[in-house]
Image (cartoon, rainbow, N blue to C red):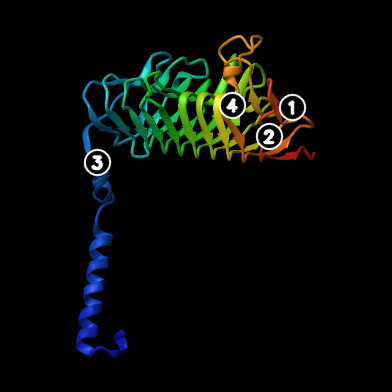
């Protein structure tokens, strides 16, 4: 039955009810509508620097700023802590380009960092094994956007659905990484813009883990993905400058001696990747076995 089929008195009552409900929704203040997002918060982080010493979910309810040049803006000191920024900023831009500070550091097991906009630190977010970094925006880090270091006892670090923007701004660094992982699963992230002109840098660098369904776009010469003993699957990589290498499989891990090759560092898988605008014959650079060349990867050469 449609409204035209209703008796007139029911039609009037129905419309009055809808109007009343709409009015009630529109009159609710914005902060009251957002209050539900704080229901699971054990406490709030209102100033920087801050150290979390109790388990549970700790939330931001406003933008936070710091000018510290070292240490951590937020330190997670115990296991099983969630930092939920609710979309608010943790900003270290006041320290300038020479900063050595870290935005959020949670090396304890079970740390989760979500919904944060972290900007202007040397390292934006650093976590340990059994941790989760999801749905964050990490911007203008001077050295590493997200550093996820898993544990040898099986505590894998997970990094997913983050946006890492303009890493390497400011002073010249020896190395710059958008996302750096060890024993990690790095999935569904966007790494856009590496700003260093010299040294070693990569959109994503990983040892022992998986890099899948990420979008990596470099602004300067470097590597799209550097991977040792890792699966590199279904990623989209795009170069902006002639000379970039799409996927690099080193003979040794990135922090070691690259002149000493080890078979252990060969990738587990390299397939389904799409490389756009990479130069000439070297979209891949691999030791020993050309695994990336032998699999289902798509290379679209540079077209000036």
Identify the mark at residue 243; answer none if there is no mark: 1
Residues 264 and 157: in front is 264
Left or right relative to 132: residue 16: left
Is any part of residue 57 visible from this angle?
Answer: yes
Q: Nearer the viewer, residue 254 or 294?
A: 294
Distance from disc 2 to disc 3, alpha carbons, whole Å, reads 41 Å
Residue, x 34% and y 31% (percent of image)? 112
Nearer the viewer's eye, disc 2 or disc 4?
4
Q: Earlier in the sequence, mark 2 or mark 4?
A: 2
Where residue 215 appears, as percent x and y from the top left, is 57, 38
The answer to which quarter of the image holds residue 272 is top right
Closest to the camera, between mark 3 and mark 4, is 4
Give the distance between the C-alpha atoms of the residues marked 3 and 1, in whole angstroms. 48 Å
Residue tagged 2: 239
Q: Do the numbered discs 1 and 2 sit on residues whose CB atoms are within 8 Å? A: no
- Whole-Å distance between the Cαs marked 3 and 4? 43 Å
- The first of marks 3 and 1 along the sequence is 3
Question: According to the image, label 4 marks what residue?
Answer: 267
> Which comes sooner in the sequence, label 2 or label 3?
3
Residue 27 appears at what percent x and percent y?
A: 25, 59
Q: Position of residue 160 (x, y in %)?
A: 45, 36
Residue in the foreground of this view, choosing between 110 and 126: 110
Q: Is 286 above or below relative to 70? A: below
Q: Quadrant of the C terminus?
A: top right
Badge 1 element: loop
Disc 3 or 4, which lies upstream in sequence? 3
Residue ID at (59%, 26%) = 267
Residue, disc 3: 38
Q: Residue at x 76, y 38 (%)?
A: 301
């Amino acid at each position: 039955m449609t409204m035209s089929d209703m008796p007139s008195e029911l039609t009037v009552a129905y419309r009055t009810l809808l109007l009343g409900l709409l009015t009630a929704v529109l009159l609710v203040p914005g902060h009251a509508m957002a209050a539900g997002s704080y229901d699971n918060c054990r406490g709030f982080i209102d100033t920087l620097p801050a150290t979390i010493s109790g388990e549970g979910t700790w939330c931001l309810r406003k933008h936070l700023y710091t000018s510290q040049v070292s240490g951590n803006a937020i330190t997670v000191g115990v296991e099983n802590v969630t930092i939920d920024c609710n979309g608010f900023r943790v900003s270290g831009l006041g320290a300038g380009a020479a900063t050595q500070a870290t935005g959020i550091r949670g090396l304890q097991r079970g740390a989760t960092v979500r919904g944060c906009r972290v900007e202007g630190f040397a390292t934006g977010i650093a976590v340990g094994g059994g941790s989760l970094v999801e749905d964050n925006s990490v911007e203008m880090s001077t050295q590493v956007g997200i550093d996820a270091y898993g544990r040898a006892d099986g505590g894998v670090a997970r990094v997913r659905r983050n946006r890492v923007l303009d890493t390497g701004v400011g002073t010249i660094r020896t190395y710059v990484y958008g996302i750096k992982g060890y024993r990690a699963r790095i999935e569904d992230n966007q790494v856009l813009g590496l700003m260093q002109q010299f040294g070693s840098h990569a959109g994503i660098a990983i040892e022992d883990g998986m890099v899948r369904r990420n979008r990596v776009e470099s602004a300067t010469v470097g590597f799209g993905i550097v991977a040792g003993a890792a699966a590199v699957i279904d990623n989209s990589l795009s170069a902006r400058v002639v000379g970039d290498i799409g996927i690099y499989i080193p003979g040794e891990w990135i922090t070691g001696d690259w002149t000493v090759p080890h078979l252990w560092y060969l990738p587990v898988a390299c397939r389904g990747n799409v490389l756009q605008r990479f130069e000439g014959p070297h979209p891949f650079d691999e030791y020993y076995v050309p695994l990336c060349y032998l699999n289902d990867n798509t290379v679209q050469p540079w077209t000036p």
